[in-house]
Image (cartoon, rainbow, N blue to C red):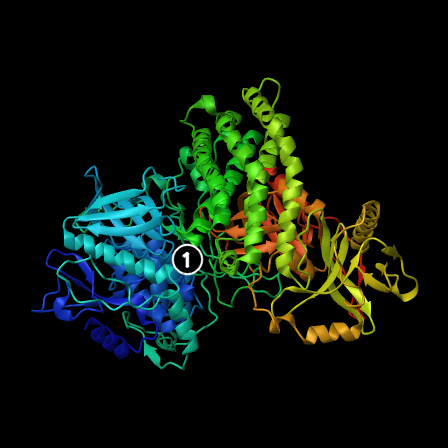
Amino acid sequence: MGRVLFEQVCKQLHLLEADYFGLEYWDTHGTRYWLDLQKPISRQLGLSLVDPLLHFCVKFYTPDPAQLEEEYTRYLFCLQVKRDLSHGGLQCNENTAALMASYIVQAECGDYVAEDYPDHTYLSSYKFVPQQDQEMERKIMENHKKHTGQSPAEADLNLLETARRCELYGVKMHPAKDHENVPLNLAVAHMGIIVFQNYTKINTFSWAKIRKISFKRKRFLIKLHPEGYGYYKDTVEFFFEGRDECKNFWKKCVENHGFFRLSAVKHISRHKTRVLSRGSSFRYSGKTQKQIIEFVRDNYVKRQTFQRSQSFRHSSAHSSATNMHSTTVGNSISAHPLLPLADSNLSDNTKKDLIDRTKVNNSNVLDNNNFYTSTPLRTTNGNLSEISLSTCSDNYYSTINTLNSEDSPSKVLAKEQLMNSINANTILNGNTTNTTTIIADIEGETKKKPRYILDKTYYIAKEILMTELTYKKDLDIINVWFRDEIGKEEPEECQILLSLITPLAQAHGLLVKDLEQRLQGWDSTGGPRAAAGRIADVLLAHLPPLLPIYEEYLDGHMLVLERLDTAFKQNNRFEQLYRDFETQKVCYLPLTTFVLKPLHRLLQYQALLQRLLKHYGPNHPDRADCLTASDTLKDLMVPVSETLEQSKNLATLCELQRDIVGFDNLVQSGRKFIRHGCLLKHSRKGYQQRMFFLFSDILLYTSRSQATLQFKVHGHMPLRGVLIEEPDGDLTFNGLIIYGGNRALTVAANSPEEKEKWKIDLQNAIQLARDKSDTKITYLSLKSCSSSDEHIDQAENNDVGTQTKPQAQRSNSTVHVCWHRSTSISMKDELLAVENQLSGYLLRKFKSSNGWQKLWVVFTSFCLFFYKGCLDEFPLASLPLLGYSVGPPQVDDQIGKDYVFKLQYKNHVYFFRAESEYTYTRWMEVIGSATQSRLKKKLTLVNENKIETSTEK
C-alpha cells in the first residue's frame, strides 16, 4: 500500500506534521501525480514499476507558515520553497527573489561578516534562481547584511512569510482549455480553484462559491451555488488533454478541499470494483489542517536535533555554530520580513524581470509581482486593549502588491487597493521580538499622483467606493457564508432573510463595478476627461432599480429578526448553527447587525450626497445629478429613520438576551433599551464591579461569569417607584443611590461624565415608566434577587457555568468592552454610530521603529477592524475604541508626518496616518463619535474598596 511507503519515509525523517507532505512522481508524459496512500503501489496511475522514482514534497502549502508548529517542519517547507525558486516554479520579481534568497543565506550561512565575504562571489557557487547573474548576487548580499542577529529558525519563518505573499506560492499549473478552446492553466490552493491565462490569474472560484466538483472523461466541472456569486452561469466547464489528467486534477481538488476546509474527514472504506461503476470512490484520507495542529499540540515531546544542509562553505565560527538546532512545538518566534528593496539605480521602465520566459508544463512563464494573502483574526478574551495579529489557514482571497511595478497614472487607484504589509505577525500595539529587523518606511514607495486627486471631490468619491466595498462584503456574509453554513436544507426562518438579501447583493455587486470603473477612469490621465469630477451620476443610474428592493427589505426585515429570535429560542439545532456561525472569523459582528446593514447604508448614502452638495459649487457638472439622487432617496429616508430605531432596539434586546443569564423574558413588546455599562456597587466588602442594564421599564444589575463570560443577573428593579439621589459623606464621589421597594443600591461611576449620563437616563426612564399604565410584566420580588453580600458571593461561587453549557462569546462586543473599560453606551450612541461608519486604507506606525504598515481599516460598531487588503474575508484583529481618546500627536511623540492622529487608552497608544486632509478629517470625525476625545482632568477612580488616581487623555 502507498501508506506503508509514506509512513516509512516519515518515520525515517522523524516527521510529526507529516500530512503537509506527500510523495510525488511523474508519468511518461510529464504529468505529476501524488501517491495514493489507499492503493497498492502496483496500481498507481502512471507510476512505472521498472525504475520507480518518487519525490518527497510539500503537498499542502499552508497560507500561514506560523501555524507550522515545529521548526523542523518549517525547515522542510523552506527546502521546498528553495527548490521552487531555483527551478522557476515560484514566480516573483527580482527584488522579492533577492530578499528570499538572502533569508536562505542567513539560515545556512549565518550573519554577514565583511572579512569573510568581501564581495558577492561567496554566493556564486549556489543557484537561487534560473537566471542568476552578478547583479542578482549583489542584491542578495545587500539584503543579507540587514539580517544580522536572526537565527536560522527566524530566517526560515521570514522566508516562508515572504514566499507566501507571492501569487504563485504553492501553485502547480495544470494545462486545460475552456469551452471556447482557449488554452488556460488551472491550479488548486487553500482558497479554492484558480484559473490562469498563461501565468496571469483571471479568476478564482473560492470553496465557499463551489457546490460540487466532478469530472466526466476529460471534462472537469465546477458547479457553483446558483445565486449571488457574480458569475454568469452555475456550471463552469474545462477540458483536459485526457481522462487521466482530468481525474488527477480532480483528486488534487478533493484533497485540498478536505485538508483546508474540513474539521475532520469521514473515513469510508473503498469498495471493490462493481460491474457497473458508480464513479470514483476517492476521498481525502489524511488529517485535516485543524487535526494536525491539535495532534501536534497534544502529542508534544522533546524532539531530537536536526542537521541543516551545508550548502555554503563556512569560514566564521559564528556561522558554523548556528546549524544544529533543537526543534520545539509552539515556539514564540514570529516573522518580521523586510519589504523587497527597490532598485535605486534603474528606473521602473528599465527594470528587468527576474525570470525570462521559461517553459513549465509546456507553457510560457510570465513574471508576476508578488501577492499578499490575508491573515485572519485571533483574539483573546482577556485584555481587549492588547490584541495581537495572528494567523490561520482559512484564507480565500489575495490582494496585489506592486511595489516594484511601473506606476503609470492609470494604475494609481489600483495601487490604493494594494497591500504593503511589512510584518504579518506584528502585534497591534507595537510589541515585537528582540530580533533585529529593518522595517522600510512605506512613504518611500509612493509616487506622484494625478492632479485630480488633489480635489476634495475625489476623496468623497473614494469614500463612496471604499464603504461600498465593505457593504458588499457585509451582504455576502449572509448571502454567501451564512447560506453556505445552513446548507441545502434552508430552515424556514432563513428563507425570508436570504430572499431579501440576494437581490441586494446582486445589485450592489454591479454598483461596485461601476464605481471602480469611474474611479479608475478618474485617476487615469489618458482616461475620459468628461467623467472626471463626477460620481453622483453613477449612484443615480443605480437608484431606480435599487429602491423597490430596499422598500421590500424595509417591510420584511423586522419579521426576519423576530423569526430568527423565535427559532433561536425554540429550535436547539438552529441555536447551535447560529452560535457556530457567529464564532467564525468571517462573522466579525453579530448576525443581527448584518441584517440591519441595508438600513445603515441608506443613511450613509444620504450623508455622502449631502457632503457632495455642500462641496459643489452652483455650476459644478455633478451637482444636478447629486440633487436628483438626494431627492430620489428622500421618500425612503423617512420610514428608514423611524423603522431603524425599532429594529435596532429589537436586535439589541435579542443580543443582550444571549449575553444575560437569569432573566429569560428580556425581549418584550414595548420594552426599549436605554443604556448598559459598568458601575461599582457598594456592599459590605466595599465596591464591587457590576454590569447594569437600563431599559424603559426595568433596571438589571449583573456580574460576569468567568466560566461562560455571560452576565448573571443578581437583581432587578421595576422603574415605577424607583428614586435616585446623591449620597453624602464618603460615598459622594461620582456616586448615586437608587431606591427601589425595600432595597437601596449605592453605585459609583468612573467619572463625573459617566455619572451624569446614568443620572439623566435613569431620571428620564423613571418618569416615562410612571407615565405609562400598569404593565402586565411579572417581575421577581426584589428580595428574591437580593443584592446582599451573602447572596451574591454564594451566587458567584455557584457559577452559572456549572449548569449552563459554555458558549463562545464575542470579546469585542460593546457589552464586554464596557465591562473591561468601565464605561457605558446608550441607544442614542448606537444610533449615532450607524451614521459614523468608514472604510479605507490607513498607515499604522510601528511602536519600535519609524516604519508604517498599510492596512485596510473598517470602522463600525465602535470598533476598528484591521485587514491586509480590501478583499480579505475576515479581519487580522480588532480594536474597540470605547474609552479611547483621539487627537493629533503631540510634539513629544516626534511623528514628523502630516495627517496623523493618535489613539490612546491609558498606556496604550497607536498612531495612524491618512492619505489626505479630507480623509484625516473624516477619520477624526467618526472615531471621535465613539471615543472620549476631550482632555480629562485627573480622576480618582473607586475600584473595589481601593482608590486609584489616573490621568487619561
Query: Could you say where residue 87 lies in the image, as x and y percent from the top left?
Result: 23, 57
Q: Is there any visible trace of residue 838 in the rendered image? A: no
Q: Position of residue 62 (x, y in %)?
A: 36, 61
**Residue visible at 20% across and 74% down in the picture:** 5
Relative image position of residue 902 (x, y in whole percent): 64, 50
Residue 785, relative to residue 30: is it above or below? Answer: below
139 or 473, which is in the foreground?
473
Does 934 appear above or below 908? Answer: above
Point out residue 472 in the picture as x, y percentages from the top left corner: 48, 41
Query: SS of the residue at dot 1?
Result: loop
Using residue 386 as the reference point, say whether residue 932 is left or right of it: right
Taking the view exactly as shown, the residue that stands out farthest to the top is 619
Which residue in the rendered view is the most extreme toward the right?
A: 729
Give, as a three-letter code, the residue at label 1.
Asp
Q: Quadrant of the C terminus?
A: bottom right
Farthest residue toward the left? 50
| Rendering quarter of residue 2 | bottom left
Residue 826 appears in the picture as rendered: yes
Residue at left 43%, top 74%?
297
In front here: 169 or 889?
169
Left/right of residue 539 with respect to residue 944 in the rendered view: left
Q: Relative to residue 619, is residue 402 depicted above or below? A: below
Q: Which residue in the protein does label 1 denote?
A: 394
